């Protein structure tokens, strides 16, 4: 969403045509040159006269012709009011006018505009803008001071000529939501149990080809290019048009289960399994796996496909199923690390790989061995600078209980830690360098005992030698350290 101030001289396109509502609650004054009026001597005789128009809050209106040097102190004949606000200044400098005259409430009306070009809601002010002297009439205009709109591409834009006002945008948001539901401007059936949101409107304005609401829950719909495609057709497409009834049934149940569990549908693994696994029984078993959302959410489809093609060179489909079946809430981090190793140097792994058992730990270890040479060459010379959150993260270092807590400051130091604990923490060099994650080492008598990863001030993982669990004593110390320095724990 973009947020910016509207220029004080609002474009004509930003003025919404509507029935003009004269604002009689505020006493206004407007002054225009007499020579610009359509009168008997228009463009023939030049004068130094001006016309003052007064609109009092009591309803009285008065036009006065005067020489421009003449001072006029107008007092309403009906109510005696002598305070009138400059309408032209209010139109041209609405922010400053509102600041100086905070007692004046400029908010007057709301408008909603629906067109092929987009959808918008406006908060308008209605002010005098000109005088028709021949007809003895004061002319009014409306101008947007707050607007909330969607363009034809579905982008949501907030504009405001006055300081941002959350309550005002809540009103505009509700206007849009009510109108969309009333007119079904999206041409999409919104289930009654769904509370429509601006994000949903933006989604279906962006993807106009989708006419079924449930597509809102799909994690990626760029592959669905057919206009008016149905959910059934889309599931068939991401299943690579497999015809087996058991596969279709498994895909549909997976779809429903994900909507219930995640309120999101990640289809990439279904595409992967149905494309590269021939055995129908294995395909169905793979689709029926309850893969945790962390993996579903952060899986790169191209990476996974490359990884699957690599596995098929060395292992059977049943072995690949066993590997995927072993991924759980407690092992998914190893799986992600293994994929990161594979992505880091797929060519090196292809050249140096020695077939090992098709298990997470074995493949992870083998990939680390295959990438070690390249990683050492690239990462050992890197220096870490904990610049952005230096004070916060470095303050967690130092003596804690019997341990000394440290951060690594070079890739070479991190490599030594990884060698001691026999794990893959060296592969986190780039993430540490960019301050995306932080690794702390816990030393006892100058010997590294275990390490922890902190991401967004939350504990991600902690392990001792060879990724083993911490002892009860170590775990108690770790959580005491977390309680002191960090507030969010995964």
Image (cartoon, rainbow, N blue to C red):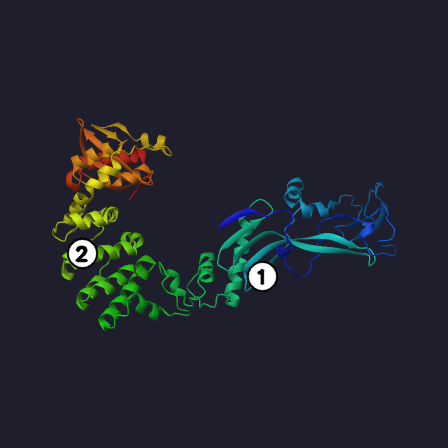
For disc 1, the neighbor class at 10 Å (few under 14, some 14 to 19, many from 20) is: some
Callout 2: helix, strand or loop? helix
Give the CA distance from mark 2 to mark 1.
56 Å
Q: Is residue 67 left or right of residue 302?
A: right
For disc 2, the neighbor class at 10 Å (few under 14, some 14 to 19, many from 20) is: some
Residue with the mark numbered 2:
311
Residue 170 coordinates in the image, percent (x, y): 52, 53
Q: Nearer the viewer, mark 2 or mark 1?
A: 2
Residue 441 coordinates in the image, percent (x, y): 23, 33
| Sooner in the amino-acid sequence: mark 2 or mark 1 | 1
Quarter of the C terminus within the rendering: top left
The residue depicted at 62 percent of the width and 55 percent of the height is 14
Q: Is residue 325 left or right of residue 73?
A: left
Q: Is residue 349 something that shows in the picture? A: yes
> Toward which corner of the image does residue 232 lie, by quadrant?
bottom left
Residue 208 vertical placement versus 457 (above, below): below
The residue depicted at 47 percent of the width and 57 percent of the height is 198
Residue 189 vertical placement versus 123 (above, below): below
The reply to whether dot 2 and dot 1 touch (C-beta < 8 Å) is: no
Residue 80 coordinates in the image, percent (x, y): 80, 46
Residue 302 coordinates in the image, percent (x, y): 29, 56
Residue with the mark numbered 1:
113
């Amino acid at each position: 969403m973009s947020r910016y101030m509207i220029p004080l001289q609002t474009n004509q396109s930003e003025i919404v045509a509507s029935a003009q509502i004269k604002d009689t609650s505020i006493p206004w004054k407007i002054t225009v040159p007499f020579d610009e009026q359509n009168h008997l001597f228009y463009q023939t005789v030049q004068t130094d006269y001006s016309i003052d128009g007064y609109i009092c809050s009591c309803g009285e209106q008065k036009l006065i012709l005067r020489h421009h040097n003449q001072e006029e102190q107008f007092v309403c004949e009906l109510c005696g009011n002598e305070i009138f606000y400059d309408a032209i200044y209010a139109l041209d400098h609405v922010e400053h006018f509102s600041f100086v005259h905070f007692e004046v409430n400029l908010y007057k009306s709301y408008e909603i505009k629906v067109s092929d070009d987009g959808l918008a809601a406006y908060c308008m002010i209605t002010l005098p803008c000109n005088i028709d002297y021949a007809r003895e009439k004061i002319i009014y205009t409306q101008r947007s001071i707050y607007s909330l709109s969607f363009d034809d591409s579905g982008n949501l834009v907030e504009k405001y000529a006055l300081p941002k006002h959350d309550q005002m945008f809540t009103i505009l948001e509700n206007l849009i939501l009510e109108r969309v539901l009333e007119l079904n401007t999206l041409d999409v059936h919104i289930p009654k149990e769904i509370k429509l949101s601006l994000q949903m409107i933006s989604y279906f304005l962006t993807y106009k080809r989708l006419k079924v609401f449930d597509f809102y829950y799909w994690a990626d719909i760029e592959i669905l290019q057919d206009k008016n495609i149905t959910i059934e057709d889309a599931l068939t497409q991401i299943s690579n048009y497999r015809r087996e009834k058991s596969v279709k049934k498994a895909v549909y149940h997976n779809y429903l289960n994900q909507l219930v569990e995640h309120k999101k549908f990640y289809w990439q693994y279904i595409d992967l399994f149905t494309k590269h696994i021939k055995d129908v029984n294995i395909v169905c078993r793979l689709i029926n796996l309850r893969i945790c959302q962390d993996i579903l959410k952060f899986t790169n489809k191209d990476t996974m496909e490359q990884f699957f093609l690599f596995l098929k060179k060395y292992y059977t489909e049943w072995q690949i199923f066993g590997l995927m079946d072993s991924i759980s809430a407690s092992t998914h981090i190893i799986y992600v690390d293994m994929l990161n190793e594979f992505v880091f140097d797929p060519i090196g792994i292809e050249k140096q790989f020695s077939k090992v058992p098709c298990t997470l730990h074995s493949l992870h270890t083998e990939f680390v061995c295959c990438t070690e040479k390249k990683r050492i060459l690239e990462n050992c010379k890197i220096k870490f600078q904990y610049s952005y959150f230096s004070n916060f993260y470095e303050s967690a270092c130092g003596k804690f209980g019997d341990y000394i807590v440290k951060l690594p400051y070079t890739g070479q130091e991190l490599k030594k830690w990884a060698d001691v604990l026999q794990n893959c923490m060296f592969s986190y060099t780039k993430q540490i360098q960019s301050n995306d994650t932080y690794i702390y080492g816990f030393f006892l008598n100058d010997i590294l005992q275990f390490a922890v990863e902190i991401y967004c001030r939350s504990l991600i993982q902690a392990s001792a030698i060879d990724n083993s669990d911490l002892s009860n004593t170590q775990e108690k110390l770790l959580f005491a350290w977390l309680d002191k320095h960090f507030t969010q724990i995964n």
